[in-house]
Image (cartoon, rainbow, N blue to C red):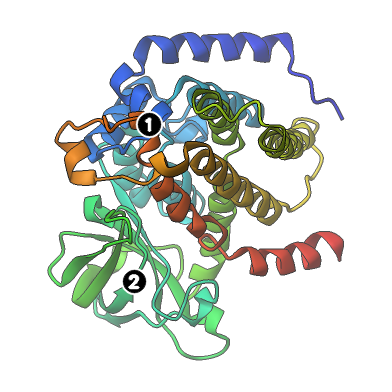
């Protein structure tokens, strides 16, 4: 097992670093590095910059308009963009639904949907979770009934992240009640402007608005928007979730946020506290261990060996690390982490209260928000059972 990068890979890294330095808008990088809220326009501006370069679908093969990078090159791209302060690529289009359309969609569907994803023009949302169907996703009840050349969809999805921005939405829907619950699920995409689709915000405790309920009331969807075969959606969902869980691990963002923990701790005078330094050191050890696990997977892929099915393990460790660095930031900021007033900051107020820096204002909000990371994408308790069965035997 060789975890070192080749000279060619190092050259590739330098090329990506130089391009990002020249093209990443500095106002966006400032928001990312200070933990400030990004608008839809911020996300799409960066997505379109990447799309113009052909890098928004950086994990795509050349036959679908991607760069055709190796797994190592994809990792280096993610590392360099995170280091520079670029926003995460919103995954629902390029990272999640696109691979499903590539693998299981028809040629017509690929030609119809992939260009808008690759350019950053079309914002996709995910319709998986429902009230009562989260980690037990196979129990979902949203129904799609076939009538002639269309499906009629009724039901509800919940926790739809950034669904208020969505142009299109991919959904798991029930098309049969026969047999096991998994065997009656289909994968359908729909236009969120279709009559009968309504989006209702779920306001979080901190006043934030990033998740939604989405309701379907007799929504008519053309039958040619079924991806793959009817009642085979569970297979496609598992294909997608492996991408989601690996994406959640996000070791490169963790490395960037570790440096932010250190900056905040130094600015707030707690970096020299031995116990606090111990917690930073333990976090750093776990981030290095997670990175080594990712590099082991990349090494196996380079050598043509089958890597362990560890998407669930990456999700477990990555999500726990995210919770820990958000907690350490809040503890370092102390009482100055509390006074987040979203409306005031959006209007230009920069947290200029006595004794605190603007970057401290969102820390408590981020801490509470990140309690979700061990739940979404399949709760960590369930993921531990899956790892036990598939890896440990």
* Above or below, comparing residue 133 to residue 391 in the picture: below
Which residue is drawn at the image coordinates 48% and 33% (left, top)?
63
Splitting the image into 4 quarters, where does residue 285 fall? Answer: top right
Query: Mark 2 vs mark 1: which is more N-terminal?
Result: 2
* Above or below, comparing residue 123 to residue 382 in the picture: above
Query: Dot 1: few (<14), some (14–19), or many (≥20) neighbours within 10 Å?
Result: some
In this rendering, position of residue 61 left or right of residue 26: right
The residue that mark 1 highlights is 359
Splitting the image into 4 quarters, where does residue 274 fall? Answer: top right
Q: Secondary structure at mark 1?
A: helix
Quadrant where the N terminus is found in the figure: top right
* Above or below, comparing residue 84 to residue 179 in the picture: above
Q: Nearer the viewer, residue 159 or 34?
A: 34
Q: Secondary structure at mark 2?
A: strand
Residue at the farthest front position: 354
Indicate the position of residue 203 as horizontal and vertical percent values.
27, 62
In this rendering, position of residue 182 left or right of residue 27: right
Residue 157 numbered tag? 2
Quadrant where the C terminus is found in the figure: bottom right
Which residue is drawn at the image coordinates 40% and 35% (left, top)?
360
Indicate the position of residue 159 as horizontal and vertical percent values.
37, 64
Residues at discs 2 and 1 in contact (Cβ within 8 Å):
no
Q: Nearer the viewer, residue 103 or 117?
A: 117
């Amino acid at each position: 097992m060789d975890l070192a990068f080749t000279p060619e890979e190092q050259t590739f890294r330098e090329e990506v670093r130089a391009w990002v330095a020249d093209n990443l808008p500095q106002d966006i990088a400032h928001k990312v590095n200070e933990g400030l809220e990004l608008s839809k326009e911020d996300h799409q501006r960066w997505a379109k910059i990447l799309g113009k370069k052909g890098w928004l679908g950086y994990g795509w093969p050349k036959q679908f308009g991607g760069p055709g990078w190796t797994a190592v090159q994809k990792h280096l791209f993610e590392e360099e963009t995170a280091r520079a302060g670029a926003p995460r690529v919103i995954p629902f289009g390029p990272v999640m639904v696109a691979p499903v359309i590539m693998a299981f969609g028809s040629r017509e569907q690929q030609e119809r949907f992939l260009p808008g994803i690759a350019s950053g023009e079309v914002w996709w949302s995910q319709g998986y979770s429902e009230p009562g169907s989260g980690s037990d996703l196979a129990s979902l009840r949203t129904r799609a009934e076939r009538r002639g050349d269309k499906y009629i969809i009724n039901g509800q999805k919940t926790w739809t992240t950034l669904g208020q921005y969505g142009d299109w939405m991919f959904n798991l829907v029930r098309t049969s009640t026969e047999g096991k619950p998994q065997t009656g699920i289909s994968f359908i995409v729909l236009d969120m402007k279709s009559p009968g689709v309504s989006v209702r915000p779920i306001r979080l405790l901190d006043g934030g608005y990033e998740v939604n309920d989405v309701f379907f009331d007799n929504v008519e969807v053309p039958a040619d928007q079924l991806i793959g075969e009817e009642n085979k959606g569970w297979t496609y969902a598992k294909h997608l979730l492996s991408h989601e869980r690996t994406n959640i691990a996000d070791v490169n963002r963790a490395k960037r946020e570790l440096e932010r923990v250190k900056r905040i701790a130094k600015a707030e005078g707690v970096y020299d506290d031995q116990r606090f330094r111990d917690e930073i050191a333990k976090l750093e050890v776990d981030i290095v261990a997670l990175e080594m696990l990712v590099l082991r997977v990349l090494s196996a892929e380079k050598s043509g060996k089958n890597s362990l099915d560890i998407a669930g393990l990456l999700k477990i460790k990555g999500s726990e690390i995210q919770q820990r660095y958000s907690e350490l930031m809040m503890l370092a900021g102390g009482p100055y982490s509390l006074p987040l007033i979203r409306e005031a900051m959006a209007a230009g107020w920069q947290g200029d209260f006595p004794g605190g820096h603007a970057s401290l204002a969102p820390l408590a909000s981020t801490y509470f928000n990140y309690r979700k990371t061990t739940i979404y994408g399949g709760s960590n308790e369930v993921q531990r059972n899956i790892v036990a069965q598939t890896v440990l035997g």
